[in-house]
Amino acid sequence: MRGANHQSLILVLGMHRSGTSALTRVINLLGAALSPNLLPQAPDNQRGFWESAGVRDANEAVLEALGSAWYDFAPLPAEAAESPGLAEPLENLARVLDRDLPQGGMAVLKDPRLCRLAPLVLPLLARQGREVKVAFIHRHPWEVARSLELRNGFDQDLSLLLWLRHTVDAEAHTRELPRAMCAYEEILKDWAAVARRLGNGLGLVWPVEPDQARSAVEAFVSPGMRHYHAGHQDAALPATPLGRTAARVHALLLESGGDFACLPAQAFDEIRAQLDQ
């Protein structure tokens, strides 16, 4: 492993189909370096995932060793790091992170699996001397469910459970880190305002000023990227305990105004405990 030198890493967290790819590319265009080993474009994401193929595969191997998968909403074991058979996949993940993440300066890493795997991955990044800052993006759960129905054939209940799991785990696992958030629709409507909020919230000076990046970002980001529109209304969610819980979490995210300090930690802890059961 290379020597541990002080490096800034922006960890983009959020549920699958929530705009993590769009946010990662915007951060990249603002000067944060990406892995050179990116996933190729696909029919379900024609503008690119901007995600390390090696890290994605290594994360999948860790989840498999834990008896889980990206589409599993069950909690990971409390002492996951001590799970039998995990040592080799974790060491492989450490090697891949060291190989695939740029060395020096500001970098950005995205994989929705990290919402659940953060307790295992953050210590690996700390060993490599990386200063981690979290950029969290959220999207209306109904929109995520519609996207997953089209891409994966998931029913709405499964998608809502996955949305809750990724959201509350990401929040719980990152409380000790600098972090800021945005909504998917904000990226599409006013990416520059989001860039300013993230920069201020994370204590960052973007290597490329937003005005300098404007033409490149606006060639990439457009309102047409959003194929499902729920607005801020939760009427589309089912009138079930699951639907009401998803609506409550979504409302709390919106009410925070993009400020994690305004999220009620106790409410999120209670919801996470209910989900675990």
Image (cartoon, rainbow, N blue to C red):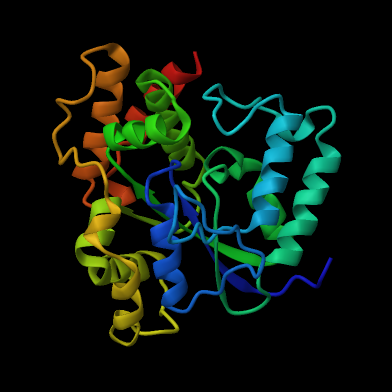
How far from the left and from the top, in percent, is residue 89? 80, 42
Can residue 228 be seen here? The reply is yes
How far from the left and from the top, in percent, is residue 250? 26, 35
Left or right side of 248 for 207: right
- Residue at (29% x, 22% y) in the render: 245
Considering the image in quadrants, where does the N terminus appear? bottom right
Which quadrant of the view contains residue 163? top left
- The residue positioned farthest toward the bottom in the image shown: 212
Using the image as rendered, state which of residue 186 and residue 224 is in the foreground: 224
Using the image as rendered, state which of residue 2 and residue 267 is in the foreground: 2
- Residue at (69% x, 51% y) in the render: 123
- The residue positioned farthest toward the front in the image shown: 43
Left or right side of 277 for 26: left
How far from the left and from the top, in percent, is residue 186? 23, 57
Using the image as rendered, state which of residue 220 and residue 70 is in the foreground: 220
Can residue 258 be seen here? The reply is no
- Residue at (58% x, 65% y) in the render: 131
How far from the left and from the top, in percent, is residue 168? 42, 34
- Residue at (52% x, 24% y) in the render: 73
Residue 227 vertical placement versus 77 (above, below): below
Which quadrant of the view contains residue 145? top left
